[in-house]
Image (tube, helix red, strand yellow):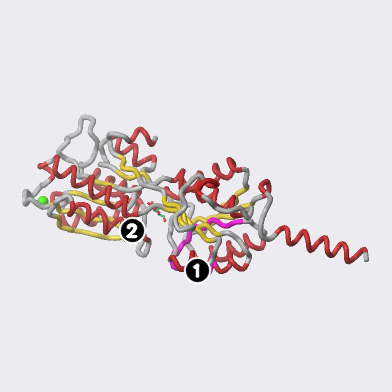
Amino acid sequence: MKKSLTAIAAALVATAAIGTAQAEDVLIGSCIYKFDDTFMTGVRNNMQKAAESVGAEIELVDSQNRQPMQNDQVDTFITKGVNALIINPVDRSAAGPLADKAKSADLPIIYINREPDKAVLDGWSKAYYVGAKAEESGTIGGQLIAEYFKAHPEADKNKDGKLQYILIKGEQGHQDATLRSEYCVKAMKEAGLDIVEIGSDNANWDKVQGHDKMKNFITSLGIDAIEAVLANNDDMALGAVEALKSEGYNLGTDGKDPSKFVPVVGVDATAPALQAIAKGQLLGTSLNDAVNQGTAAVRIANEAAQGKPVTDEAIGYKITDGKYVWIPYVRVTQENYKDFM
Ligand code: GAL
Ligand code: CA
């Protein structure tokens, strides 16, 4: 008799541990595709802060850009008994099996930054996505270049009435790389520019790769042939700026030759990008809002972990189709960069 009561008690404790958690003991397990990524470091730090502010605990792990490692980390989190998962997939096409794991364990799963197929989210009632519409940031970048080109006739270096530009893209297969590339070109055309793409390459969000790719373009095309650079993120844009600097270009406005400037745009509004805008080395960027993306993800995780409905009111963000939170991008130039520092 005694034994079976203990068994029942143990079973009850075990049941309580799965499914929903009490507000005070929510534990969120989160995998970041790689810690060594400037923008995702911002998101990560803000998730930590948001968890503190809602009184949840969060454990963040580095997936080191390896999907199999991330899959194992998710298994470990589930075994450990986390109450919700926040996942920044390494490979967004591998998001499906992670949703299956979450579903089998009855756990909410919130994807961030790398958007899974809609079918993945639709396949599990506790699956969500928090991100930003890449089209917006692409459009902002294209518009910034178009405005600059119109305001500075000398930017048409070869005086052919066309804009010869270089595109430095993020990781292949990433929605932000595809859509930003497509929409920046679209925006330049819509602004009425006659454009010619003279170079395009992937640099995987990375500053060193951005630098190296830009260096190659300068070598093969010649610095005078390049009239603008559109990069899918700030790290790659800043890498390109470094390559331009070593040619004596984009050294900044203080005392330097203003004609030696190639307009470069990025996306993210990282701290170093804001500094470069301040110095006149980078034309502009879009704020990819790490604070609100991180906060929204944690709030959804925290509500869902307690079995509460994830409503606009509960999380403080608009939830679309019961699944998506979209955080808007903001245009950042020399006029307003201070607002983001
Ligand atoms: C993008 C961001 C990049 C990089 C990437 C990682 O949204 O602009 O800088 O962080 O996400 O997935
Ligand atoms: Ca030209």
Residue 23: tell me if it is visible. yes
Left or right, 191 with respect to 276, comes to: left
Choose between 257 and 148: the one closer to the eye: 148
- On whether ligand 1 comes within 8 Å of the CB at mark 1, the answer is no
Q: Is residue 96 above or below residue 87?
A: below
**Pointer 1 local density, CA inside 10 Å: few below 14, some 14–19, many at least 20:** some
- Contact, CB < 8 Å: mark 2 with mark 1? no
Task: Please say if 137 is above or below 68.
Answer: above
Q: Residue at x 22, y 33 (%)?
A: 253
Q: Which of the 4 image quarters holds residue 29?
A: bottom right
In the rendered image, which residue does mark 2 sit on? 177
215 within the magenta span? no
Regarding residue 33, the answer to whether it shows in the image is no
Magenta stretch bounds:
84-99
Q: Residue furthest top?
A: 255
Rendering coords of residue 93 (x, y %): 44, 68
Q: Which mark is residue 96?
A: 1
**At label 1, which amino acid type do we have?**
Gly
Quadrant in the picture for residue 183? bottom left
Disc number for residue 212:
none
